[in-house]
Amino acid sequence: MSSSVKVATFFSQTEALIAAEYLRANGLVATVMGDDAGGAFSGLTLSKGFCIYVPQADEEMAIELLENPPSELTDENEGEAADLSNSDTPDINQVEY
């Protein structure tokens, strides 16, 4: 069984969860550990923060990904912001909602 190593610490649980999901989206196993008293103290820096742990074999890759996050979604072919609209979905009539 491989051991886990801490690769980052965040003050808020939300930031830690976003960073962990980014690592997972890149194929790594990431675990968030921390305590905010079940949400009672969320946003307060009373604890040691929320830590992200990855398997020791993935430590270098995780640190690289966290230190160099993508700045924006880009279209690799044109270098411009990608068009995220989906032409296959029908228009939603706002009157219905």
Image (cartoon, rainbow, N blue to C red):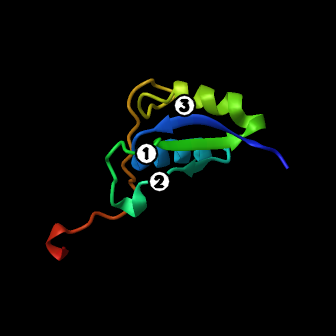
Residue located at (55% from left, 50% from top):
33
Q: Are marks 3 and 1 in contact (CB under 8 Å)?
A: no
Q: Secondary structure at mark 1?
A: loop
In depth, the one of 55 and 37 nearer the eye is: 37
Q: Residue furthest bottom?
A: 96
Return the residue at label 3. 66
Q: CA distance from mark 3 to mark 1?
A: 22 Å
Check the image and report above or below for 67 versus 57. above
65 relative to 41 in the view: left or right = right
Residue located at (63% from left, 47% from top):
30
Observer able to see residue 88: no
In depth, the one of 56 and 46 nearer the eye is: 46
Return the residue at label 1. 47
If you read the primary sequence from the N terminus, does the residue marked by circle 2 or circle 3 appear first? 2
Tell me the amino acid under the disc marked 2.
Asp
Q: Callout 1: few (<14), some (14-19), or many (20+) C-alpha neighbours within 10 Å?
A: few
Q: Secondary structure at mark 3?
A: helix
Return the residue at label 2. 35
1 relative to 31 in the view: left or right = right
Observer able to see residue 33: yes
Q: Are marks 2 and 1 in contact (CB under 8 Å)?
A: yes
Q: Position of residue 47 (x, y in %)?
A: 43, 45
Q: Secondary structure at mark 2?
A: loop
Q: Nearer the viewer, mark 3 or mark 1?
A: 1
Check the image and report above or below for 65 versus 46. above
Q: CA distance from mark 2 to mark 1?
A: 7 Å
Q: Which mark is residue 90?
A: none
Q: CA distance from mark 2 to mark 3?
A: 22 Å
Tell me the amino acid under the disc marked 3.
Leu
